[in-house]
């Protein structure tokens, strides 16, 4: 199996993803083994500065430094379990010394496979309002809907102010956001387009089909590791 490299943008999302690689591989193959993987993490503050300023060039430079460190550990391909940095994915893929899986392409293809017609994108404000998935999904005939401005602000706050710092009251705040914003969105499925959101949301508590991008990219990493 190929050695997986995981670029840790936020440790919450990276750890959910890594754990899913282990548990899903064991579930599929009924074995105690799993693909080898290495995680590299720079401080989140380095990424946050460039995400907020939408400086994708500098963001790609930091991620490429992380990829180079992972390659020195023997990694043979890379996943980035974080949606927003995929604004820079073309730059990253062009310059990476090893293959990098494009989560946006893979998630969009999965939406088609599942027959979704109208999806809601939940993530950081930059992801929801900046059109990260727009061209990919619209070209496949899938309509995108996002919360209004106040809703986007609440979801963005949930991610940056509650989930990433792992505040104890993130669960209770997530219930408020779900009841006042998410459950009122007109869609037939929800894309958790922030790899931290699975820490608090799933199909059971959102009452709709959910595409969990964090665990989905873990499944794709397993598939690629076996090619």
Image (cartoon, helix red, strand yellow):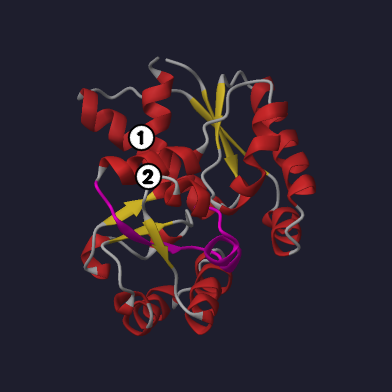
Q: Is residue 122 magenta?
A: yes
- The C terminus: image quadrant: top left
The residue identified by callout 2 is: 215
Q: In the drawing, what numbered circle is on residue 124?
A: none
Tell me, yes or no, if residue 225 can be seen here.
yes
Which residue is drawn at the image coordinates 35% and 75% (left, top)?
182
Residue 187 is drawn in which quadrant? bottom left
Which residue is drawn at the image coordinates 43% and 43% (left, top)?
17
Choose between 168 and 5: the one closer to the eye: 5
Say if mark 2 contacts mark 1, CB within 8 Å.
yes
Tell me, yes or no, if residue 19 can be seen here.
no
- The N terminus: image quadrant: top left
Q: Position of residue 141 (x, y in %)?
A: 36, 50
Would residue 10 appear left or right of 120 to someone viewing this image? right
Would residue 3 appear left or right of 174 to someone viewing this image? right
Q: In the drawing, what numbered circle is on residue 219?
A: 1
Q: Is residue 68 magenta?
A: no
């Amino acid at each position: 199996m190929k050695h997986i490299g995981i670029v840790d943008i936020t440790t919450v999302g990276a750890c959910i993803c890594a754990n899913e690689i282990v548990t899903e591989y064991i579930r599929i193959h009924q074995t105690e083994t799993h693909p080898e993987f290495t995680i590299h993490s720079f401080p989140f503050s380095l990424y946050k500065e460039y995400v907020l300023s939408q400086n994708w060039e500098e963001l790609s430079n930091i991620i490429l430094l992380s990829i180079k460190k992972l390659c020195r550990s023997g990694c043979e391909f890379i996943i980035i379990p974080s949606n927003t940095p995929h604004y820079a994915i073309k730059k990253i893929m062009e310059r990476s010394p090893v293959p990098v899986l494009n989560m946006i392409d893979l998630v969009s293809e999965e939406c088609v496979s599942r027959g979704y017609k109208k999806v809601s994108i939940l993530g950081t404000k930059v992801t929801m309002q900046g059109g990260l998935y727009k061209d990919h999904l619209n070209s496949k005939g899938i309509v995108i809907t996002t919360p209004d401005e106040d809703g986007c602000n609440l979801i963005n706050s949930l991610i940056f102010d509650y989930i990433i710092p792992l505040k104890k009251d993130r669960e209770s705040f997530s219930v408020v956001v779900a009841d006042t914003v998410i459950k009122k969105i007109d869609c037939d499925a929800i894309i958790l387009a922030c790899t931290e959101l699975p820490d608090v949301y799933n199909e059971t508590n959102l009452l709709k089909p959910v595409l969990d991008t964090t665990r989905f990219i873990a499944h794709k990493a397993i598939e690629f590791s076996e090619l």
